[in-house]
Image: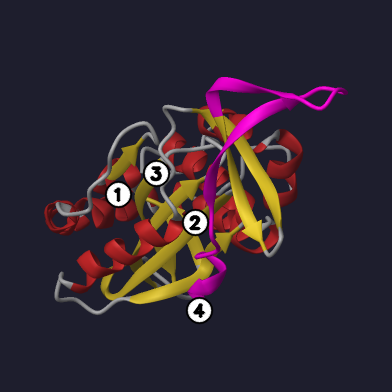
Amino acid sequence: MNLESYYFPVEEKDIALFDEVPWTEAISGYKAIVAPNGSSEKVISVVKNSYKLVPNKELIEPFMDQVSKLGVRWKIDSSHSFCQINRMRFQITFPDILVKDQESDIALSLFLHNSYDQSEGIRLFWGAIRSVCTNGMVFGNLLGSFYSRHTKGFDFEDIYTHFGKASDNIHEVQHRINHMQEIPVDQELMDDLQRVLGKRRMQDIIHTDRVPEKSQWDLLNDITYYISHDVEVEKRAKLQLGISKVLAL
């Protein structure tokens, strides 16, 4: 995957009000985040001065450096990665760190998020990719997550510790998968999932407005397949996180 699309330049600029007469009035307490483009600039957002700009490159490169020191095989994964001018999601997958269901290996992944418009802070979520259909899912509750506001610092130096804790908890993910394969869907779960997805979208996924006669795990795979294949890539994370929360993953 070409990372140059993530590494476009961004800068902070002072902002001011322009009146009809030839003078300007500086606006205190705020600044603009802009993307220079030759002789012009594209304004991405206007933020408070307390906002600390963290370019994608300053996140991705130390992140990959720390992951490289873990001593396990990993790859940059484009299946759920994207970069827009205002925010990005960067995914790596560990193809040898697996949990399983009855049909597929499920490789653990890490999802790194950043934004330039305060739509979200710096986020790092554990998740997984189901190999049979590249379904993406998030295991932030079971394996842990990292969050930092742009008004504070961030540090990936302890990623080794987070990785160790996640590795220790993989058995919990496997136990949860095994359990969900045996538990049927009930109306309470349906109601909770509909609040995240919406009734119409839920009906499109399961082709009924009634409680389906299937296991919770089968329903999760139906949902994650839909999100991973029928939802625009930049909109997937919100739905994946919402479903993960409902199912305590």
Residue kind at label 4, given as amino acid type: Met
Q: Quadrant of the C terminus?
A: top left
Give the Cα separation between the discs numbered 3 and 4: 21 Å
Q: Is residue 246 visible?
A: yes
Span of residues in magenta:
1-30
Residue kind at label 3, given as amino acid type: Ile
Give the Cα separation between the discs numbered 3 and 2: 10 Å
Q: Which residue is mark 2?
A: 89
Q: Is residue 46 above or below residue 173?
A: above
Q: Which residue is mark 1?
A: 176
Circle on res. 82? none
Residue 139: horizontal and vertical position, in percent? 35, 49
Please tell me how crowded label 2 is: few (under 14), some (14-19), or many (20+) other residues with Cα within 10 Å.
many
Q: Are marks 3 and 2 in contact (CB under 8 Å)?
A: no
Please tell me how crowded label 1 is: few (under 14), some (14-19), or many (20+) other residues with Cα within 10 Å.
some
Residue 35: horizontal and vertical position, in percent? 61, 54
Of the numbered discs 3 and 4, the one sitting upstream in the chain is 4
Residue at 18% over, 58% down: 163
Give SS at disc 2: strand
Residue kind at label 1, given as amino acid type: Arg
Circle on res. 122? 3
Which residue is more in the foreground, 92 or 158? 158
Q: Which residue is mark 4?
A: 1
Spot the residue most to the right: 20
Which residue is more in the foreground, 182 or 120? 120
Residue at 57% over, 69% down: 5
Q: Nearer the viewer, mark 4 or mark 1?
A: 4
